[in-house]
Image (cartoon, rainbow, N blue to C red):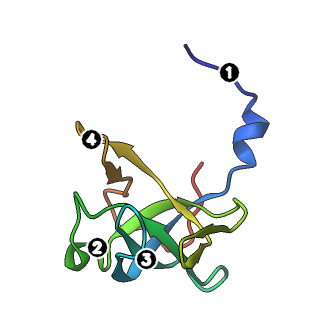
């Protein structure tokens, strides 16, 4: 069942595109993940996050990949890291994330509308 919201509620969520500039394994968590540094352009800068992407991505293919992320959630402690953004994805058949990425190069920091 769909739960409807008003458009102005959606506008409060700040979803932007950024380029992954660094990715490294974080095996200190119960479910191993990757720590990502994402460049959101000059106005926003570089943000860090932890994402459970190891089933579908290796580090090399993530570098320079553009991804969609929510920027205005409160920072969250995830193991030994403060996650500053939430990267967005859809579940595959095994309920593992597939990242949302633009099909053409976008200026880092571009806002979803």
Query: Where is residue 109 drawn, in percent x and y?
Result: 57, 71
Q: Residue at x 72, y 45 (%)?
A: 11
In three-dimensional space, the C-alpha distance between marks 3 and 2, rounded to whole angstroms, equals 9 Å
| 94 sits to left or right of 1 | left
Q: Are marks 3 and 2 in contact (CB under 8 Å)?
A: yes
In three-dimensional space, the C-alpha distance between marks 1 and 4, rounded to whole angstroms, equals 25 Å
Mark 2 Cα shell of 10 Å, populated few (<14), some (14-19), many (≥20): some
- Considering depth in this image, is 18 or 60 the residue closer to the camera? 60
- Considering depth in this image, is 14 or 90 the residue closer to the camera? 90
Is tag 2's residue or tag 1's residue first in the polypeptide sequence? 1
Residue underneath mark 4: 92
Residue underneath mark 1: 4
Numbered mark located on residue 36 in the image? 3
Is tag 3's residue or tag 2's residue first in the polypeptide sequence? 3
Residue underneath mark 2: 62
Q: Are marks 1 and 4 in contact (CB under 8 Å)?
A: no
Q: Are marks 3 and 4 in contact (CB under 8 Å)?
A: no
Secondary element type, mark 1: loop
Q: Residue at x 76, y 28 (%)?
A: 6
Secondary element type, mark 2: helix
In three-dimensional space, the C-alpha distance between marks 2 and 1, rounded to whole angstroms, equals 34 Å
């Amino acid at each position: 069942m769909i739960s409807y919201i008003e458009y102005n509620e959606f506008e409060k969520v700040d979803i932007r595109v950024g380029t992954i500039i660094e990715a490294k394994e974080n095996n200190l968590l119960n479910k191993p993940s990757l720590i990502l540094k994402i460049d959101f352009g000059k106005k926003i800068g570089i943000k860090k996050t932890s994402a459970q992407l190891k089933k579908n991505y290796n580090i090399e293919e993530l570098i320079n990949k553009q991804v969609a992320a929510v920027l205005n959630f409160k920072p969250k402690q995830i193991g030994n890291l403060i996650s500053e953004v939430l990267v967005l994805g859809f579940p595959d058949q095994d309920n593992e994330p597939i990242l949302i990425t633009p099909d053409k190069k976008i200026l880092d920091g571009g806002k979803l509308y």
